[in-house]
Amino acid sequence: MSAATAERPSTASPVSALVAPIRTRTWPTTLAALQVRNYRLYLSSQVVATTGLWMQRIAQDWLILELTGSVAAVGIAVALQFAPVLLFGLWGGVIADRYPKRRILMITQSVATLMALTLGLLALTGAVQAWHVYAVAAMLGFVTVVDNPTRQVFVAELVGDSHIRNAVSLNSSVFQFGALLGPALSGALIHAVGQGWSFLINAASCLLVVIMLAILKPTQVARDHGGTRAKGQLREGLHYIAKTSEVAWTIVLVATMGIFGLNMPVILAAFADQEFRSGVGGYSMFNSLTAIGALMGAMLSARRTETLRLRALVTSLTLLGVAVMMASLAPFVWMFGVVLVVIGLLTLLFLTGANSLVQMTSEPHVRGRVMGVYLLVLLGGQALGSPAVGWLIDQFGARPSMFLCGGLVALMSVASGMAMAHRARLTLEWDRSSGRVPLHIVHQ
């Protein structure tokens, strides 16, 4: 199997020239990107924002389940939130490369504030209906189209090329900290006063991001004037992906993850409601356990000093599929929870490795478009997979559906690895004279 070619030198981004020399104090390896002041401010806002985001996710899923009584309806809400990415995600990357990124993020986060505020007020007044939740989910999907690729590239420009890998891992750590804290807070609020306050808290957290973006030191982001507008920019980005094998194969693996492996909200809602009868408290606990594992995986990724290669991505994704299959067979809730921690860890090891590989391999002038495609297959895959999984659960139950998802992840990962090996003309050779490991990968 190809471990990818050697990392190519890339042209430094305009902002990296500004941020790279800034070393006011010595930071440990796992926190190296925090030596950049603007990134410290931005990341601090993300701690609050991701907590609010997860509070809204839990409240939204449980609200639609209460309003409709259908797990498939939860899948539809998830699909509506990610369908715009599937349809328009390619153009989100073009926008990220074309316009100033801080301005884009201030606009998208302002819209997200209004959407969360609207849903919160509807829930608190008792006027909320299922179509309200669907409409807000779809609107947030359009925000995601532009916000996510812009955010990815904006972080890379804040920290410079030398800290991209560490910043990706720290972002994932913060996101999973929010995923750990948010469900617990949301579950307590839902039990005490209903879903409305979770939406309002998320509105406040989105507003905090807007404020923090406004006060970033302009000397380190002033050069971000966006790219020039020209014909064929989308085609140029797709051509770049097609000719860059590391990026192309990573996106194939991420697509597998998006379609078959990132439908856990639907599955966990079904297990909490149907299998273990644990209600919203159990649903929050399952999400928190997954987040604990994911936080562990993110911190392990932050300690890495080298970019994860394709061979490691295939291995981690295959193990993730096996872990999902094992979770589907767990007879007791404590056993199910233990495997969820493993699933969270493997998920983050894969996602942070894939993200850093794509960003480190891509040239800065096309990075936004490449990340647009990356996020299209990752989030758009959920738009395809979530309603399908919801339908499967309604028809056949949570356990068979979860087992099938895990099996498909493992199968597609192994198949992709074999295809990479065949294309790179790699094969396995048994060497009995070897002192330790008789099985070797050799080039034909």
Image (tube, rainbow, N blue to C red):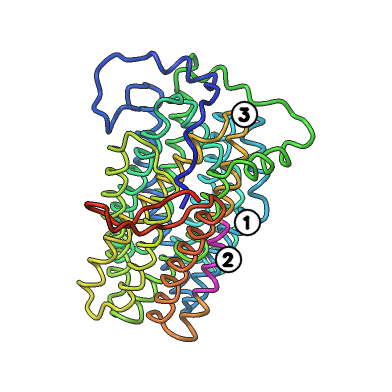
Left or right of 338 in this view: 270: right
Percent across and percent down for residue 197 are 38, 55
Residue type for callout 3 = His
Give the residue type at disc 1.
Leu
Upstream in sequence: badge 3 or badge 1:
1
Badge 1: how crowded within 10 Å, few (<14), some, or many (20+)? many
Which of the 4 quarters of the picture holds residue 419? bottom right
Circle number at residue 315: none
Q: Do the residues labelled 2 and 1 touch (CB within 8 Å)?
A: yes
Residue at 28 percent across and 58 percent down: it is: 432
Distance of mark 3 from mark 1, alpha carbons? Answer: 23 Å
Q: Residue at x 22, y 78 (%)?
A: 332
Please tell me whether residue 275 is drawn above or below residue 383 in the rendered image: below
Q: How far from the left and from the top, in percent, is residue 261?
A: 44, 63
Which residue is tagged 3?
A: 365
Which image quarter: residue 44?
top left
At mark 1, the secondary structure is: helix
Q: Earlier in the sequence, mark 2 or mark 3?
A: 3
Q: Circle 2: is it few (<14), some (14-19), or many (20+) Cα within 10 Å?
A: many
| Disc ID at residue 384 | 2
From the image, give the main secondary structure of the stretch colored magenta.
helix
Q: Give the range drawn in magenta.
A: 380-389
Q: Dot 3 surroundings within 10 Å: few (below 14), some, or many (20 or more)?
A: some
- Residue that carries the numbered disc 1 in the rendered image: 86
The reply to whether the magenta stretch includes residue 387 is: yes
Mark closer to the observer (3, 1):
3
Taking 250 as reference, is 231 above or below it? above
The residue nearer to you, when weighing 392 against 311, is 311
Q: Nearer the viewer, residue 129 or 77?
A: 77
Along the line of sight, the residue nearer the viewer: 440 or 348: 440
- The amino acid pointed to by label 2 is Leu
Residue in the picture at 52% in, 21% down = 12
